[in-house]
Image (spheres, helix red, strand yellow):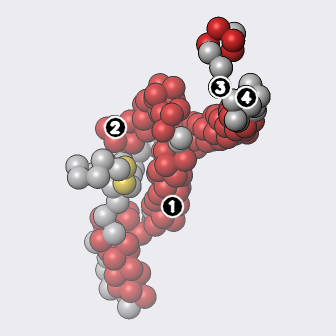
Amino acid sequence: IIRHPDDNKLYVNFDHEILQLIREAKCLDRMGIEIPESAKIALFQEEKFKTFYRQLHWALTEYDRIVTDVIPVTAMILRPHFNDMEYKLRPGMITLTWTSMNIDAYIGHVHAGLKKLKELVSNINDIIENRVEKNLKVVSKTLLVDLPEHSSFTVADFV
């Protein structure tokens, strides 16, 4: 996973030339031509690469969607939770490679974190929209004092 320097978004760091290499290795194999050892290794891991790429791409897309769902008023409250999610994503940015043995566990950890974050943001948005906003609308429409329109009075008379 890499962070783009311009838009600060996270992207899956996967060179699509690897897929081209795999396609070419398949063609060479069908033609009966000897395949280099490095191409064989990539060919044997094709499904793994594609699966990991799809899962990571989905996770980062979901993370972006959750970030955009945050109501600005709640952004500061949710900041520690987003920092925690960034912490969960960090091994994919620093230590993990496409041939690491624990990518499955990492992806599971990220997906669990995304599920928890999604539920939290959804619940907070629901509370803001359905409890706070609706109650504010009700209070704003409530008539606190019934003042006569065509007469005036002093503050002492009002109190």
User: How far apart are the alpha carbons under marks 3 and 4?
Assistant: 9 Å
**Residue 112 appears in which quarter of the rendering?**
top right
Which of pointers 4 and 2 indicates the residue nearer the eye? 4
Where residue 60 sits in the image (x, y, percent)?
Answer: 47, 51
Quadrant housing residue 130: top right
Cβ atoms at labels 4 and 2 below 8 Å apart: no
Residue assigned mark 4:
147
Q: What is the x, y in percent for residue 93?
A: 34, 42
User: How far, Cα to Cα, is label 3 from label 2?
Assistant: 76 Å
Name the kind of residue labelled 4 in the image. Answer: Leu
Q: Label for residue 133? A: none
Most foreground residue, 79 or 89? 79
First of labels 2, 1 by sequence position: 1
**Residue 3, relative to residue 30: is it above or below?**
above
Disc number lying in front (3 or 4): 3
Specify the label residue 95 is tagged with.
2
Viewer-nearest of discs 1 and 3: 3
Q: Is residue 150 visible?
A: yes
Measure the alpha-carbon separation of dots 2 and 1.
19 Å
Mark nearest the camera among 3 and 2 is: 3
Give the residue pinned by disc 1: 54
Check whether the beta carbons of the residues at disc 1 and disc 3 lie within 8 A of each other. Answer: no
Distance from the alpha carbon under mark 1 to that under mark 4: 65 Å
Tell me which residue sits at (38%, 65%) in the image: 42
Q: Residue furthest left?
A: 5
What amino acid is found at the position of numbered circle 3 in the picture?
Ser
Location of residue 159 in the rendering, given as x and y in whole percent from the top left corner: 69, 10
The answer to whether marks 1 and 4 mark residues whose Cβ atoms lie closer than 8 Å is no
**Residue at position x 32%, y 74% from top?**
21
